[in-house]
Each structure stands twice: as C-alpha cells, then as structure tokens.
Image (spheres, rainbow, N blue to C red):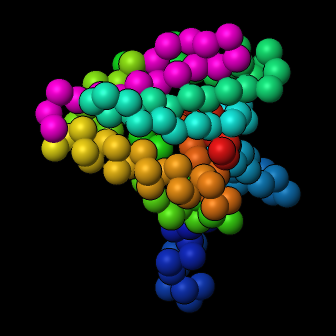
Amino acid sequence: MSAVMMERFSAASAPAMPSWQPTGLPAAAPVAGNMCVVPRCKIKFEKCTGGFKLHCKCDDEMSCATLQNLCKMLCDGLCSCICSCNGLECCKCSFANCHCKCEYTKDGCCITCTSGDKQCCEMLQACCDCCAKCCENGCCCYVCFNNTPVCCGTC
C-alpha cells in the first residue's frame, strides 16, 4: 500500500502488511514541481480589420529564438491569452472563433487573430481591449497555444 492509502485507515484497523522495502529508505522519490519557463517580452495589442494583432517583442536574441521556436511548434493550435494579477488569473480569452496565424519579426513574433464574421470580429476586438487594459494596469499576460504558454509579459 502507498503512504496515501495507509492514511485512510486507522492504526487499529489496518492489517499488518509485510514490508517489502528496506527500512530507512523513503517509499518514493519526491516529485519535481511542474514548472514552465517561457520568454519574457513586451506585449502590444492592436486592433486591425477583422480582429486584432498581438505583438510580442523580446529584449535579447535568446528570448526571441525561444519564443519563435515555441510558436513554430505550437502555433497550429488554439490561441489564448491569460492575464494574471499577483499570481491570480483575472482574465482569460480563448480565440476559438477565429483564425490565428503567427509571423516572426526581427525581435519576436506577431500573432494575428481574425474572423470574417462581423460579430466574431467584435468579440475579438473586445478581448483585445480587455487584455490590453489588464496589461496597462499591471497584469502579466501569458500568450498560449493549446493552453501551453509561449511567452509572458506586460505592455
């Protein structure tokens, strides 16, 4: 039985189990934390015909190359932006109702999300305004493809 399973029984009702592990050793190795390191960049939101553009600008070549490689691997999936304030998610916009394409720039990338539908375009531009306002007021924005962050930053 695992340590978690043993906690469910009281000591009096637990059957005596022979130990198969040598004494003095831990039952299992500690699990490493699930961490994701993404490049930090300046993010700029810009409305355009049919939707909006998201400009991610990196300060150094290594961050730029990392961002472009992550986009290259993941950009065919669902694009979303998550804004957090003091580590707590305060806004999440998923751009499922549009077509998103990623183009590389000399210092990062430009993600364009557009739709031919008028109402979808209005929703996209409202999301653009919301994310821009969050960033302008101190939130950190995480740009994601398939819920995997590719960069984070502020305005």
Q: Which residue does the image show at 44% across and 51% down from the upper left?
A: 129
Q: Which residue does the image show at 49% across and 51% down from the upper left?
A: 131
x and y, in percent, of residue 120 in the image: 20, 40
x and y, in percent, of residue 71 in the image: 53, 19
Residue 53 horizontal side relative to residue 77, left or right = right
101 and 14: which one is in front?
A: 101
Q: Which residue does the image show at 38% across and 30% down from the upper left?
A: 48
Q: Is residue 146 visible?
A: no
Please tell me in which quadrant of the rendered image residue 52 appears.
top left
102 and 45: which one is in front?
A: 45
Q: Main secondary structure of the magenta part?
A: strand
Whether the magenta-drawn stretch holds residue 117 is answered as: yes
Residue 37 horizontal side relative to residue 4, left or right = right
x and y, in percent, of residue 55 in the image: 56, 29
Q: What span is in magenta?
A: 102-118
**Quadrant of the rendering where the C terminus is positioned:** top right
In the image, farthest residue toward the right: 24
Q: Is residue 57 visible?
A: yes
98 and 34: which one is in front?
A: 98
x and y, in percent, of residue 151 in the image: 62, 34
Whether the magenta-drawn stretch holds residue 17 is answered as: no
145 relative to 85, above or below: above
Please tell me in which quadrant of the rendered image residue 87 appears.
bottom right
Residue 3 horizontal side relative to residue 5, left or right = right
